[in-house]
Amino acid sequence: EVQLVESGGGLVQPGGSLRLSCSASGFTFSSYAMHWVRQAPGKGLEYVSAISSNGGSTYYADSVKGRFTISRDNSKNTLYLQMSSLRAEDTAVYYCAGGGPGGWGQGTLVTVSS
Amino acid sequence: DIVMTQTPLSLSVTPGQPASISCKSSQSLLHSDGKTYLYWYLQKPGQPPQLLIYEVSNRFSGVPDRFSGSGSGTDFTLKISRVEAEDVGVYYCMQSIQPSFGQGTKVEIK
């Protein structure tokens, strides 16, 4: 069974940085592309970023391009999202997804506020 | 960017009655590999999204057969043959060609 557990969320000031982690188990992590999706309070789902199985290819939504960096450590079965120059509009629950289209974590809340 | 447009945005359904949600994409979702990368998710209150349908019409493991997906190219539909109380939540279509989600359709029980 695919299990994804996010961590690293919290309260950060505008302009600050935060690194999210997603620990994966139950599947061969190094064989799957991985994704980050976010959901602002009371809003719909927004696709944020993706990374190929070997980390050689990445994708970013325009809203985060140049500020967020996705990476992965296949030796640790862990996905990361480094977020910098954070804005109020980045406030959201951030979900890790992968291991096939059915794999989603429970999410971690990021709040950007002074 | 590929824009996904869902209709309706909300739906109130009597238990046992059918329901249908439309999803239209601004570009064809047919990939050069012959697959169409259109997915349907249900997000129940307080939970992460759960996959219902992948690649237009394939039910994910454990999904009841009252859920079905159809369509091609740019026009897709999710149908629930007989809505049950546990089906309430927000339904999203999603494409993974240039990943994006529809706005969501909130389904409630009358």
Image (spheres, coloured by chain):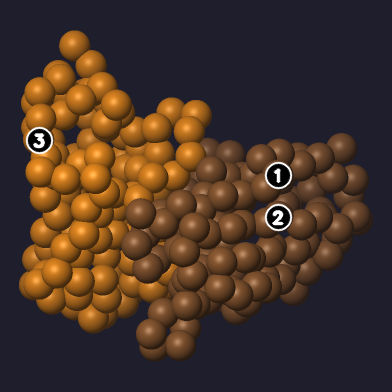
Chain colours: A orange, B brown
**Residue holding disc 1:** B8
* Front position among marks 1 and 3: 1
Kindly check if marks 1 and 2 are in contact, taking CB atoms under 8 A apart as contact. Answer: yes
Q: Residues within 10 Å of mark 2 (few under 14, many from 20)?
A: many
Q: Are marks 1 and 2 on the same chain?
A: yes
Q: Position of residue B83 (x, y in %)?
A: 82, 55
Q: Secondary structure at mark 3?
A: loop
* Letter of the chain that mark 3 sits on in the rendering: A
Which amino acid, mark 1? Answer: Pro
**Residue holding disc 3:** A84
Q: Residue furthest top?
A: A114
- Left or right, A47 with respect to B15, comes to left
How many numbered discs? Answer: 3
- Left or right, A113 with respect to A108, comes to left
Q: Are marks 2 and 3 on the same chain?
A: no
In the drawing, what numbered circle is on residue B21? 2
Which amino acid, mark 3? Answer: Ser
In the drawing, what numbered circle is on residue B109? none
Marks 1 and 3, Cα distance to the nearest angstrom? 37 Å
Q: Position of residue A30 (x, y in %)?
A: 19, 77
Q: Position of residue B4 (x, y in %)?
A: 51, 53
Q: Is residue A29 above or below residue B13?
A: below
- Left or right, A35 with respect to B14, comes to left
Q: Earlier in the sequence, mark 1 or mark 2?
A: 1
* Front position among marks 2 and 3: 2
Q: As rendered, which of A26 and B10 lies closer to the eye?
A: B10
